[in-house]
Image (cartoon, rainbow, N blue to C red):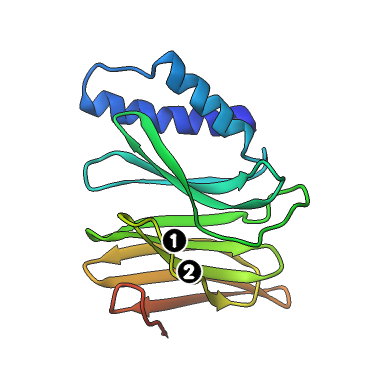
Amino acid sequence: MKQQIFAILLGLLGLSAAQAGPETVTQDEDIQLRKLADRIPSNCRVAGTRDANGQPVFFWQHTFNDGTRDLVMATSLEGRLQGIRRVTYGGSQSLGCHFPLLAIVRGGAWGWHLAWMRMNKGLFYARMDGEAWVSSPPKRMSNADVTQVELSTVNNRVSLGWLELTNNITIPTQMFSEDDGRTWVRR
């Protein structure tokens, strides 16, 4: 599975290079990507999108040097990762994938909308500023475990949909924000 994650990361960077020209990933970049893949638990997902310039942006559960597992994101410029930015704090030091569902979309010119499910804790949403790299406090959108998280945006309107798992029943749920994720209503 770790090779699949590495292939996804490399594939997204390769797509970026193919769109920008004939450049390929250098040996240093390859080493950097392999080190990054080693810090992603093999059963965890990586969410990806592109910035306004078409460069890849990644969102994943990262294992820090002290063993803490929290969410991070990184942008890429011309195939080079531009630093890892921490999104969540207070994660777990136990093994495993604590954030099995992730979603990321661009939030206009200011940054990113992020959504994730934390095992046995529910669904969360946060905004990440793309300049200062500061995240809003995570907002709990649901206390239930969920599946099939979908996050989308058009102008200032953000839509977050999911299937909520309650008493062996799957309930489709959707919330909307008309102000770039600052306030939410359920419909």
Q: Secondary structure at mark 1?
A: strand
How many discs appear?
A: 2
Taking 2 as reference, is 63 above or below it? below
Q: Residue 44: give x, y in percent of width and height.
A: 63, 45
x 69%, y 50%: residue: 68
On the rendered image, what quadrant is the N terminus found in? Answer: top right
Horizontally, residue 101 falls left or right of residue 111, namely: right
Residue 24 place in picture, x, y as percent: 34, 17
- Badge 1, how many Cα within 10 Å: few under 14, some, many 20+? many
Relative horizontal placement of residue 102, taking residue 55 as reference (left or right)? right
Between 103 and 85, the one lying in front of the other is: 85
Report which residue position mark 1 lands on: 114
At numbered mark 2, what does the secondary structure look like: helix, strand or loop? strand
Q: Which mark is residue 171?
A: none
Classed neighbour count for the residue bearing mark 2: other residues with Cα under 10 Å, few (<14), some (14–19), many (≥20): many
Can you identify the residue that label 2 sits on? 125
Instruction: Give the Cα distance between marks 2 and 1.
Output: 6 Å
In terms of image quadrants, where is residue 157?
A: bottom left
Where does residue 167 sit, x and y in percent of width and height?
A: 73, 78
Asked if the residue at tag 1 contacts the one at tag 2, i.e. Cβ–Cβ closer than 8 Å, the answer is: yes
- Picture coordinates of residue 145 (x, y %)? 65, 69
What's the amino acid at mark 2?
Tyr
In percent of the image, x 70 and y 45: which residue is there? 66
Image quadrant in which the C terminus is located: bottom left
* Residue shown at the point (21%, 42%) measured from the top left: 53
Q: Is residue 21 above or below residue 96?
A: above
Q: Residue furthest right?
A: 94
Task: Give the image quarter of residue 177.
Answer: bottom left
Picture residue at 63% right of the left edge, 71% below the top: 122
**Mark 2 or mark 1: whose residue is earlier in sequence:** 1
Residue type beneath disc 1: Leu
